[in-house]
Image: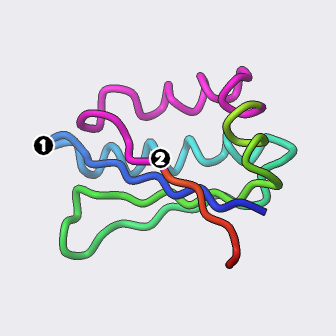
Amino acid sequence: MVTEIAIFTALAGKEEELGQAILKGLDVIRQHPECISANVTRCIEHPERYMVTNVWTSLEAHTVDFRGGPLFAQWRSHINGLFTGTAEVFHYQAF
């Protein structure tokens, strides 16, 4: 299993809209057969920041299968134009 952590920072004035869009987008991510779970949390100190936590069966399930397939475009269509720059994305595994 691999845990993907993605940090998104909302554009000014789009904080609530980004949060709602991420929630809708998680339903798309969860459709992928190799997605174990998908969740979002919001930063208390910086409410414009959201952390999306997805658990995948493998690194390739996310980086190759999901990102290379049609669900990725659907997921991004929910959040495009609502966050600054690019998301900060890292992958973790049990140590």
The amino acid marked with disc number 1 is: Ala
- Residue 60, percent from left and from top: 76, 41
* Label 1: few (<14), some (14–19) or many (≥20) C-alpha neighbours in 10 Å: few
Kindly identify the residue that appears in the image at 75 percent across and 54 percent down. Answer: 56
Q: Which residue is mark 1?
A: 12
Kindly identify the residue that appears in the image at 82 percent across and 55 percent down. Answer: 57
Residues at marks 1 and 2, CA–CA distance in whole angstroms: 16 Å
- Residue 76, percent from left and from top: 51, 29
Numbered circle sitting on residue 22: 2
Quarter of the image where the C terminus is located:
bottom right
Dividing the picture into quadrants, the one containing residue 61 is top right
Q: Secondary structure at mark 2?
A: helix
Q: Earlier in the sequence, mark 1 or mark 2?
A: 1
71 left or right, relative to 92: right
The amino acid marked with disc number 2 is: Ile
Quarter of the image where the N terminus is located:
bottom right
- Residue 70, percent from left and from top: 71, 20
Rendered position, 43 above or below 35: below
Kindly identify the residue that appears in the image at 19 percent across and 40 percent down. Answer: 11
Range of magenta residues? 65-89
- Queried whether the magenta region covers residue 47, the answer comes back as no
Residue projecting furthest to the bottom: 95
Dividing the picture into quadrants, the one containing residue 42 is bottom left
Numbered circle sitting on residue 75: none
Q: Nearer the viewer, residue 10 or 59?
A: 59
Rendered position, 65 above or below 32: above
Kindly identify the residue that appears in the image at 51 percent across and 58 percent down. Answer: 5
Dividing the picture into quadrants, the one containing residue 54 is bottom right
